[in-house]
Amino acid sequence: AQSVTQLGSHVSVSEGALVLLRCNYSSSVPPYLFWYVQYPNQGLQLLLKYTTGATLVKGINGFEAEFKKSETSFHLTKPSAHMSDAAEYFCAVSKSGGSNYKLTFGKGTLLTVNP
Amino acid sequence: EAQVTQNPRYLITVTGKKLTVTCSQNMNHEYMSWYRQDPGLGLRQIYYSMNVEVTDKGDVPEGYKVSRKEKRNFPLILESPSPNQTSLYFCASSFTGAYNQPQHFGDGTRLSIL
């Protein structure tokens, strides 16, 4: 079975500081990895995804993530935080095989950006 | 505009009173799914559907039913709601054929069962 661990349920940064949200996964087969963002009272919006190819993936709003197979990690970063980045972030994994495209989610990381 | 639409957005009801949460997508997606989101647990899959008349259980199906009579609609039915089904519910859809397809989510339905 696959699983996702997000280290830190709450991360607080200052505006302009580096954002680093950690995600580790376990999967018995090559995974497909996603980061979603959830703003208050909204659904989940895709930030970026890794499927195959280049391990450094760029997404929307200046975010990027690097797939490291040896570390089973897919950490999300942004060089300079904006107030508008305050939201909850979810790492998710899906896998090939079977008939269900289920996403297995981590428990989420709430990002607070301080002025 | 491509979207997944859920209704209602908010509902407060009482134990045992049947309710249905509707979900509709306009992207001609084959795959649709329901998740519930609870604090500290992330999102967990309730049911999914690969296409019309094809549905199956996810990780937490107890107390829920679904149907898929049309490609665009995937309602979630709570026949006899209980307080432990108080949660935030999300419908999602995507194309099939590749596990790397991102899923599109609705804005959520917050259910409170008293």
Image: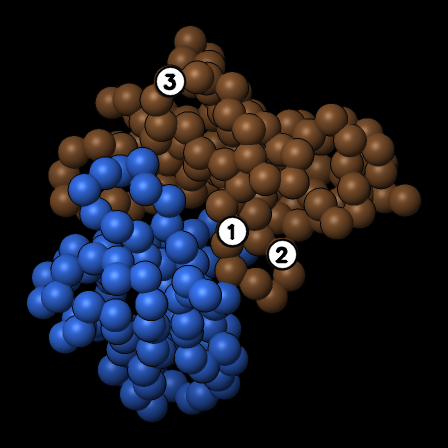
Chain colours: A brown, B blue
Outermost residue toward the front in this view: B1
Left/right of residue A82 with respect to residue B11 in the rendered view: right
- Residue shown at 71% from the left, 45% from the top: A85
In this view, A2 is above or below B87 = above
Looking at numbered disc 2 in the image, what kind of residue is underneath it? Tyr
Q: Residue furthest right?
A: A115
The percent coordinates of residue A49 (x first, y second) are: 44, 34
Are the residues under badges 1 and 3 in a single subunit?
Answer: yes
Discs 1/2, front? 1
Q: CA distance from mark 1 to mark 3?
A: 23 Å
Counting residues from the start of the chain, the first of labels 1 and 3 encountered is 1
Amino acid type, residue under disc 3 in the picture: Gly
Q: CA distance from mark 1 to mark 2?
A: 9 Å
Classify mark 1: helix, strand or loop.
Answer: strand
The answer to the question of whether label 1 and label 2 lie on touching residues, with beta carbons closer than 8 A, is yes
Q: Is residue B28 above or below residue A34?
A: below
Real-space CA distance between mark 2 and mark 3, rounded to the nearest whole angstrom = 30 Å
Tell me the residue that label 3 is attached to.
A53
